[in-house]
Amino acid sequence: MSNDYSDIARNGLWSNNVALVQILGLCPLLAVTNTTINGLGLGLATTLVLIASNLIVSSIRNIVRPEIRLPAFVMIIASLVTAIELAMNAWFHELFNILGIFIPLIVTNCAILGRAESFAVKNPPLPAFVDALAMGIGFTAVLVVLGAMREVIGSGTLFANAHLMFGEWASVLTVTVIKEYRGFLLAILPPGAFIGLGILIALKNLVETRSERIASREKQSTAVAQGQ
Amino acid sequence: MFKKALSSPYIHNPPFSTRGMMFRVILALLPAAAAYAWLFGWGVVVNMLLATGVALLCEAIMLALRGRPLQPAITDGSAILTALLLAFALPPLAPWWLTTIGVAFAIVVAKHLYGGLGFNPFNPAIIGYVVLLVSFPRELTLWLLPAQLAEHTLDPAATLGYVFGATLPSGLTIDALTAATPLDAMKTQLGLGHTTSEIMANHPVFGLVGGKGWIWIDLLLLAGGVWLIYRRVINWHIPVATLGSLFAISSLFFVLDPQHSPSPLFHLFSGAAILGAFFIATDPVTAATSNLGRLWYGAGIGVLIYVIRSWGGFPDGVAFAVLLMNMAAPTIDHYTKPRVYGHDGSGDA
């Protein structure tokens, strides 16, 4: 059973990553990743929605009739997003203002309905929870890395506005990577998001082909050794 | 969808090798480059040399990373041409990092990430320029005054000092050396409610037709372009369609409202219109490939130049117009496929 869970986790974090492999949820991914903190905020909100929706969908999977399952799932997701939106408005008001429309738009993030439909509805709550956690963290990781890339190249800082998320003490987290930086607007503008995501996907594919090549070489060498 | 688009090999009567073609284009560009340097000083020369160096370096690095042979691609002149065209579009006193970022982006991303020469859907030089224009709008508007108007000119040492160290000789500020380009000045002044005749009369940057001095660069570019057509390096279709449609649409608005529309000649001899029509839009890789398609492609560029110049946010629209039509080129090719003898032209056998 533990093997199953590690498979689920590996799927969500790496080999079936929402952003890098399934290429889902591009709209928020491209729109809000101009800073690290924006990416982190949206990633965590999405992860919360994903976990809650996977848990609920999985526990009612035997009650909901297949004919009406999609409207039911959408209603569940919409209610959860509304709850998260109200919560963020109450506790992270400024971050909520920056992320704006992209919080309610989590409803339309295909990744959430996608996981409900392809995983949660076929599995018991515990695996569904692990799947949601892994997928959510995988998505958040890409948002944070892309946000950090764009923030460093675009405005020369890292973790700007961290206090919006973690409270006043977190202002010390903000790092000015390059002093007196003029800013590279392209990275902050939408084309920078597309180029950045393209580079991340390319890097992932590079790592995969490298590791496959190493694996096949090892297999060959063990085969040769056994042959002798 | 675009399976039926025209594509190489064009084995009938190949007039030149890639290399022969690139070097003829570079040759045709040189007189105008010399005039540009003569008018705007040593910065132009520094830009062109720096851009060429960076382009060759990036080309070599990318070829090595992609495991391709270095020698044929380095010596085919395409990287040098990209660098020269980009340097032509940059302000004469561009800081070194500006030129470097633009050229590196052009060669690494716009050329090699798409598969190298012949596979790039967009003109690399234009991509490099647009990246700079979008990212550093302030640096790209710092244009020097032409030599006849300038009170101060920079000697080679001072130029190098500014390009690489951002320092000027004491007593000089960058604002004393620079001015808005004619297109920029025209756009700003029209926005303030002045009429074109007032603007042309009151501002020293304007000459008889367009910007003072700029006209010589444009005439030399025109001569170089005509020579390229004469030598059959490029076809007449794209330049004629581009400049013709720009002329036609600007004439239309000029006749309707001469006080608020610059003259058609002003449009032709300002900004990058002639450079774009003869040297950039004619890039065989990114342009439409049939003669009819080339006419549509050029006409699209001309109209878009006028639209962007008149109602867009940037003073000049050549770069964006060429990029937009680069994007449309496969579709144009699809619909303008010439009828093959023996087939009915419907495209199906």
Image (spheres, rainbow, N blue to C red):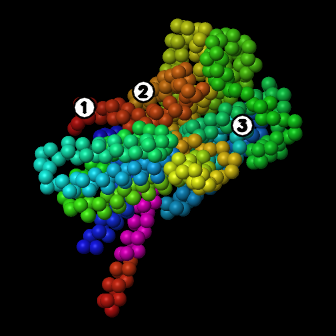
Residue B136, picture quadrant: top right
Both on one chain, marks 2 and 1? yes
Q: Nearer the viewer, residue B244 or A221?
A: A221
Q: Earlier in the sequence, mark 3 or mark 2?
A: 3
Residue identified by numbered label 1:
B346
User: Which quarter of the rendering shows the N terminus of chain B?
Assistant: top left
2 vs 1, front mark: 2
Q: As drawn, is B33 to the left or to the right of B234?
A: right
Which numbered disc flags the more N-terminal residue, 1 or 3? Answer: 3
Residue A185, percent from left and from top: 57, 41
- The CA span between labels 2 and 1 is 20 Å
Q: Answer above or below: position of A59 versus B126.
A: below
Front residue (pair B109, B156): B109
Amino acid type, residue under disc 1 in the picture: Ser
Q: Chain for mark 1?
A: B
Query: Mark 2 Cα within 10 Å, few/some/many (few <14, many 20+)?
Result: many
Marks 1 & 3, CB-CB < 8 Å contact:
no
- Residue at 37% x, 75% y is A215
- Residue A96: image x %, image y %? 46, 42
For discs 1 and 3, the disc positioned in front in the rendered view: 3
Magenta extent:
A200-216
User: From where the camera sits, is residue B55 visible?
Assistant: no
Local crowd at mark 1 within 10 Å, few (<14), some, or many (≥20)?
few
Q: Residues within 10 Å of mark 3 (few under 14, many from 20)?
A: many
Where is mark 3, residue-wise? B92
Residue at image coords 31%, 46%: A80
What percent of the width, then of the height, locates residue B296? Answer: 42, 27
Residue B296, numbered label: 2
Identity, as a three-letter code, of the amino acid under mark 2: Trp
Instruction: Choose top left, top right, bottom left or bottom right for residue B5.
Output: top left
**Extreme residue in the front direction:** A90
